[in-house]
Image (tube, helix red, strand yellow):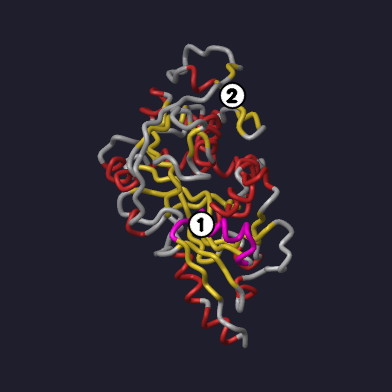
Amino acid sequence: MNTRPTRYLLAASLAATTALVTLTACSDTTDPAPAAAREQLAVAGVTIGQDKALHDALPAAIRKSGTVRVATDVPYAPFEMFVSEGEPELTGLDYDLGQALGAKLGVKFAFAPQKFDGIVPAIHAGKFDAAMSAMTDNKERQAVVDFVDYSVSGSGIMVVKGNPEKIATLTDLCGRKVAVQAATNQLDLLKAHQTACKEAGRAAIDIQTFPKDSDAQLALRSDKVVAQVQTKPAAGWTAKTADGGNTFEVVDDPAAAGGYGASPNGIAVSKKLPELSDAIQRALQALIDDGTVTKIFDKYGVASIAVKEATKNAGVN
């Protein structure tokens, strides 16, 4: 299950922003890096400062510029979004995580727009150093970029608040009406699970397809179905934000914490910058260890898809 599969295209909007920061350290005239390397930043309620050893491990050119050029395709909630429609300021899980990594490394992660299908070619051409855009780590992309994996996500089940039907697993959907958007991986997942329903001695899932995700959500809201299946990040964000979080909730199956058919999502880094991917991996692990990553993911209702260990090139397909 790909968060953003290779074939996924989304028109990019013009976006560029910088984070507000608080200067906390004294000037060091022997440090070639600009002031960005001596800043602290608050992300998801956590104040993050530079780790000098990680900063020193960065490629010399990035230490000198103080900037990691990051490609992203906006919007794709909850990973990348605009704070306000028509305005360039960004928010979202990827953006917040990028700012946290930048603060830990003592550089800025400067996000800039790029159509999704052009991100990997743009990194290969040297236009960007990295990308944070809910990108699935797979073997095809690994031929061009290296991935530092930060989440594992697949399909999730969303139900109405309180889960009155006590849905706990995918098999609990057998014999029930379930909403799903047409022509999606989630529809394929439900169709494939019909065999498991039969083997369990239960009726087939009564799959209700809708042209748009919002239509499927309306069916759930109006009790025409007992659940909606969509990507787990989308389900988490919807449950977190719809009506102040009072209408829906996400089923967390312990056997599929990141979702059904989950695959790793990673920060894509130019293969020409191995020191950068290594430093990002170490910085990400530090943010995992101190709980920052959990707080960032929880802010967007998707704590269950966060990894416990920062891996590289974990995609196997």
Of residues 255 and 195, which is closer to you in this image? 195
Secondary structure mostly seen in magenta is helix
Q: Secondary structure at mark 1?
A: helix
Q: Nearer the viewer, mark 1 or mark 2?
A: 1
Image location of residue 178, percent across then percent down: 57, 68
Q: As shown in the figure, which amino acid type bears the numbered disc 1?
A: Asp
Q: Earlier in the sequence, mark 1 or mark 2?
A: 2
Quadrant that contains the C terminus:
bottom left
CB atoms at circles 1 and 2 under 8 Å apart? Answer: no
116 lies above or below 168: above
**Residue 141 - label:** none
63 lies above or below 114: above
Image location of residue 297, percent across then percent down: 60, 45
Image location of residue 152, percent across then percent down: 53, 56
Q: Is residue 65 left or right of residue 167?
A: left
Seen at 62% across and 28% down, the residue is 42
Q: Secondary structure at mark 2?
A: strand
Residue that label 1 marks = 215
Residue that label 2 marks = 40
Seen at 48% across and 75% down, the residue is 191
What span is in magenta? 211-225
Residue 199 among those drawn in magenta: no
Q: As shown in the figure, which amino acid type bears the numbered disc 2?
A: Gln
Of residues 151 and 25, which is closer to you in this image? 151
Seen at 41% across and 31% down, the residue is 68
Of residues 115 and 265, which is closer to you in this image? 115
Image location of residue 229, percent across then percent down: 55, 63
Q: Quadrant of residue 142?
A: bottom left
Q: How many labels, in total?
A: 2
* Badge 2 density bin: few <14, some 14–19, many ≥20, Cα 10 Å: many
